[in-house]
Image (spheres, grey):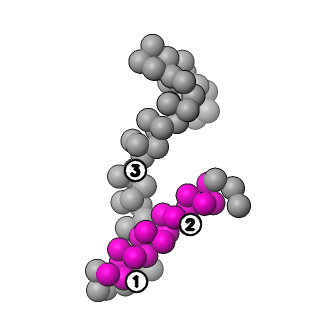
Amino acid sequence: MTPQEDLDAALTLEALCDVVSGGAPSMDALLMRKAELIVEKAETWEERQRELAGLTDAGDAAWNADEEVEVR
């Protein structure tokens, strides 16, 4: 299992628990909750990646340049 698959599984389980406890479980509700969790956690994930990469405020320009290259 890759780290991405592990993260996806954890998000799916968290979303599933939230949706089932909400009382109106459906596939649509599950996918919507999973998307909400991704948005909620995105900033924390990005900060963690910066820490792991050893980037500080001074390294932000390099980080952003890398992101621009990946997007293209």
- With 62 as the anchor, is 38 left or right in this view? left
- With 3 as the anchor, is 35 left or right in this view? left
> Which range of residues does the magenta coloring cover?
4-21
**Is residue 24 inside the magenta stretch?**
no
Image quadrant assignment for residue 38: bottom left
The residues bearing labels 3 and 2 have C-alpha atoms spaced at a distance of 15 Å
Query: Which residue corresponds to mark 2?
Result: 9
Q: Quadrant of the C terminus?
A: top right
- Give the main secondary structure of the magenta stretch: helix
The foreground one among 32 and 7 is 7
Query: Which residue is depicted at the point 51% across and 22% down?
Result: 55
Query: Which residue corresponds to mark 3?
Result: 41
Query: Which residue is depicted at the point 40% across and 50% down?
Result: 41
Query: Which residue corresponds to mark 1?
Result: 26
The foreground one among 67 and 55 is 55
Q: Amino acid at mark 1?
A: Ser
**Is residue 9 inside the magenta stretch?**
yes
